[in-house]
Image (spheres, grey):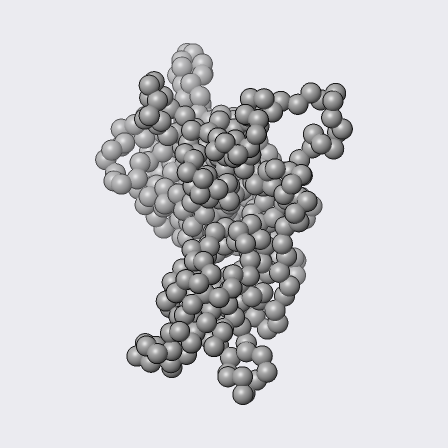
């Protein structure tokens, strides 16, 4: 008997997902809850387990295809598993009952079986939607439809131990399909030099190294005057995280009246404090972001108007009695804002540990849907890019966002003289419907005071 498994609702009302890679092939025997594929949504990369035991007959999508929720993902012949399935609670059909999946009644009871629905992936889908594939022309013309999400955070440095100089290099930037291609062709992606100025490794770069791409990368420079303008343009599909981010930023910018205020602070005392406690707290290292996060949580207690939102339906201001701190994280897939639940109840060491785990999961694409929703105030650390200040756009549904600039050693007035001090600029954007200028300035001064003199935190903790 052949069972069709449809893409389940992955939560948060996400309507579609892109196939990153299959973990099975047609003809493979699969067991219950075995991982079938990895798919990428607008929120995270999710592993899809099998609700059936049997033999894979048909994979209805290829890596790179965008599949709508409710569309058939894979067909499994469960007859092969019926002989030994009676003892596993599947009723001899290879289906998972109860907590694992919900399936429709037999063909005698209904003409069409309802789609299988995995626990933890939202409600069952009522009607199947058509599956959308990438257009072949887009693949051919872009040679880099893989370049969908370029603007990522600086990648961790990696050491190329097989080079004579043993020098540090940036972790290669590429998309999951390109990394899979490199793996299939036996190419070490860490040794590929991207041809494009954006630093992203494309399919063509991989194929050139593998001897399949014709001209070497260095010879692919084109003479602008010799080619039509259209051939020197690349169209990048906008979907997943990038599309969701764009929609959210447009909605925020044109709904909430933004205002931004700035404060430059002598944070030498905080930097010296961080240096003193470094190594005292395991496993996470306390850094300036953790210190700023603690200062924000303490200051929000005195300024609840910043920890609030405007209710569009009732024209009311909703103030939160807790702080779910969002941390803007630039990842290879685009901008994500995972949140630390009840951050105001955490110690500095606990915040540092949560920040470390949160950003690691976000950059690996393993953030859960719950982690990516429900923040009440956000911080964006633009200092990691070497930037001093900015005018951050509010995360939708929040009244404030703080940008933490780079900490720089600068000449600064200190105790009546000029001294070299560690200086940082704070940028606070706020929703002017919810927060007045005086409230924003007072909150920012409090955050700055805690960074200038971290001992003040003892008066508020």
Task: Please give left or right for residue 149 compared with residue 121 in the image.
Answer: right
**Residue 346: x %, y % from top left:** 34, 48
In the image, farthest residue toward the bottom: 108
**Residue 391: x %, y % from top left:** 59, 34
In the image, farthest residue toward the top: 417
Q: Residue at x 60, y 61 (%)?
A: 68
382, above or below 6, in the image: above
Residue 13 visible, this angle: no
Q: Residue at x 25, y 40 (%)?
A: 282
Residue 279 visible, this angle: yes
Q: Residue at x 23, y 35 (%)?
A: 280
Task: Please give left or right for residue 87 compared with residue 252 in the image.
Answer: left
Residue 146 occupies quadrant? top right
Instruction: Give the quadrant of the C terminus.
Output: top left
**Residue 354: x %, y % from top left:** 36, 46
Task: Please give left or right for residue 128 compared with residue 455 in the image.
Answer: right
Q: Nearer the viewer, residue 347 or 132?
A: 132
The number of numbered badges drawn on the structure is 0
Q: Nearer the viewer, residue 456 or 184?
A: 184
**Residue 452: x %, y % from top left:** 40, 28
Residue 95 occupies quadrant? bottom left
384, above or below 357, in the image: above
Q: Residue at x 43, y 35 (%)?
A: 187
28, above or below 141, in the image: below
Residue 225 occupies quadrant? top right
437, above or below 108, in the image: above
């Amino acid at each position: 008997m052949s069972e069709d498994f449809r893409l389940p609702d992955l939560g948060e009302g996400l309507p579609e997902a892109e196939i990153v890679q299959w973990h099975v092939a047609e003809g493979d025997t699969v067991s219950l809850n075995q991982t079938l594929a990895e798919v990428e949504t607008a929120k995270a990369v999710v592993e899809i387990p099998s609700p059936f035991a049997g033999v894979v007959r048909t994979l209805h999508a290829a890596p790179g295809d965008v599949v709508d929720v409710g569309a058939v993902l894979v067909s499994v012949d469960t007859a092969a598993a019926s002989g030994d399935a009676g003892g596993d609670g599947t009723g001899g059909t290879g289906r998972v009952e109860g907590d694992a999946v919900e399936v429709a009644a037999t063909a005698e009871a209904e003409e069409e079986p309802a789609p299988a629905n995995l626990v933890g992936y939202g409600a069952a889908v009522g009607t199947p939607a058509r599956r959308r594939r990438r257009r072949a022309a887009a693949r051919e013309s872009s040679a880099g439809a893989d370049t969908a999400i370029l603007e990522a955070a600086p990648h961790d440095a990696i050491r190329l131990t097989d080079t004579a100089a043993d020098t540090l290099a940036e972790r290669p930037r590429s998309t999951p399909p390109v990394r899979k291609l490199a793996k299939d062709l036996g190419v070490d992606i860490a040794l590929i030099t991207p041809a494009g100025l954006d630093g992203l490794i494309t399919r063509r770069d991989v194929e050139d190294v593998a001897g399949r791409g014709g001209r070497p990368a260095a010879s692919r420079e084109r003479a602008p005057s010799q080619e039509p303008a259209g051939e020197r343009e690349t169209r990048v599909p906008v979907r997943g995280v990038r599309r969701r981010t764009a929609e959210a930023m447009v909605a925020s910018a044109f709904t909430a009246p933004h205002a931004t205020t700035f404060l430059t602070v002598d944070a030498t005392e905080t930097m010296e404090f961080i240096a003193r406690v470094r190594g005292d707290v395991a496993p996470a290292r306390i850094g300036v972001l953790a210190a700023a996060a603690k200062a924000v949580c303490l200051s929000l207690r005195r300024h609840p108007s910043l920890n609030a939102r405007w209710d569009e339906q009732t024209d009311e201001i909703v103030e939160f009695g807790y702080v779910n701190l969002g941390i803007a994280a630039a990842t290879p897939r685009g901008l994500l804002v995972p949140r630390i639940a009840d951050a105001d109840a955490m110690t500095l060491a606990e915040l540092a540990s949560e920040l470390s785990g949160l950003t690691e999961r976000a950059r690996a694409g393993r953030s859960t849907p719950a982690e990516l929703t429900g923040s009440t105030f956000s911080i964006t650390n633009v200092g990691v890019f070497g930037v001093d200040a900015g005018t951050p756009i509010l995360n939708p549904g929040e009244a404030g966002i703080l940008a933490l600039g780079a900490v720089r050693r600068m000449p600064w007035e200190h105790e009546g003289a000029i001294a070299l001090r560690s200086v940082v600029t704070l940028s606070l954007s706020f929703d002017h419907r919810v927060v007045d200028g005086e409230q924003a300035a007072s909150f920012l001064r409090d955050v700055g005071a805690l960074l200038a003199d971290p001992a003040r935190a003892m008066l508020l903790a």
